[in-house]
Image (spheres, rainbow, N blue to C red):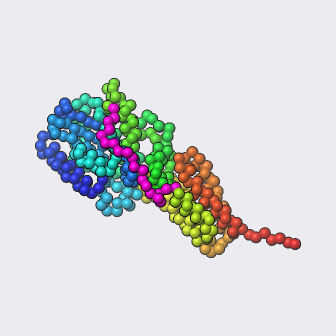
Amino acid sequence: MNFTSLKKSLLFLLLFICLNNFGQSIILSEKARASVITCDTGNESYSLFGHTAIRITDSENNLDVVYNYGAFDFRTPNFVAKFAKGDLQYFAVANTFSDFMSQYTYEQRSVFEQELIIPLSYKQKLFDNLTAVLSSNESYYTYKFIDKNCTSMVVDILNKTLESEIIIKDFDTNLTYRSILFPYFDNFFYEQLGTSIIFGTKVDEPSNHIFLPFDLHKSLQQTHFKNQLVCRESKTLLEFKKQTPNSWWNTIYTYLGFLGFILVSNNKRVDNFYFLIMGFLGIFFATVGFYSFHEELSNNYNVLLFNPTLIVLLYFKLVKNKKWIINLAVFNLVLIGIYLIVMLNKAHLLILIPLMLTSLILLVKLIFQNRKPISVVI
């Protein structure tokens, strides 16, 4: 959400709350409708997974409002640090339906609507719950990539309104979070690579709750409430052909080209730079879990490949201690072997194989360069 849209949303929210706090609460009419809005994926990092919102409309009350939990402010002090630490505050906002659709028309992202088939009393309760959230501290929440986001918050308020845990995930529960997320990064190679190596063991757990917009969209289509489906057939409000991003650098070819250059250059400085980057990344992966509240970043077994001991190896290269160069090179080769075994059933195996091969070749070369010459007596 850009800053202009955020200001308009907050202004609308302020007026909306004032009307409800200082005037009579809005009583929905028989013409009221409640629906779940699902927005298609986009090409920006924050939109790669789509978006979920709730729409309340009532022609008798001249009401057509979209509520969503996906707002954040880029101007937040230390925004990147807070996001990495896991204490960045997201918040719920209300937009007029026309403003909401204008944003997605501008971004050329398709929008789908599923009207909820629930009694008027539940529509009123949903509307009251959403209004109460917006006028209280409940509108703010600490964003969690899997556990607490724009979709999971909508699931929570729907289940709260319907007074039962009817919206649950009962499909693809044998798949891990990682294997579900991985295809969302198709055509975004470095985002796919980055998330593959920064996520730890949590994303390898079976996916047992709804956290993605299209998972909720699918779940609603097969959820029953009071012996009938909870929503009507999905209706397309906006339809755009998905635009494949056109980037010459954000592809597997630059990745393979970079690693190929390292191997064919046969240059000690280039090799040292590679080990330095891999070692520093290993330090980051090993320590970020202690700093960040994001559980997805903890217990990162990718440190077996991105190993902090590579920094120590560089030190022994500097002081020309051949014994410890060989010891650490062999140690890292063993860890790469263990890493390969760990990775055999993981979604990101293929994307990491080029890095494994590059490290293996450079470490073997290092061992041969520092081995003791064999004396031959004639």
**Left or right: where does residue 332 sit relative to residue 133?**
right
Looking at the image, is 370 positioned above or below residue 337?
A: below
**For this rendering, which residue is in front, 58 or 73?**
58
Q: Main secondary structure of the magenta part?
A: loop
**Left or right: where does residue 4 sit relative to residue 257?**
left
- Residue 72 image point, x, y percent: 31, 54
Taking the spot 38% from the left edge, 61% from the top edge, the residue there is: 81
Q: Residue 297 colored magenta?
A: no
**Left or right: where does residue 316 sit relative to residue 168?**
right
- Residue 92 image point, x, y percent: 28, 48
Inspect this view and state whether residue 333 appears.
yes
Quadrant hosting residue 372: bottom right
Q: Residue 251 colored magenta?
A: yes
**For this rendering, which residue is in front, 277 or 8?**
8
- Looking at the figure, which quarter contains the C terminus? bottom right
Give the number of marks.
0
**Left or right: where does residue 167 sit relative to residue 187?**
left
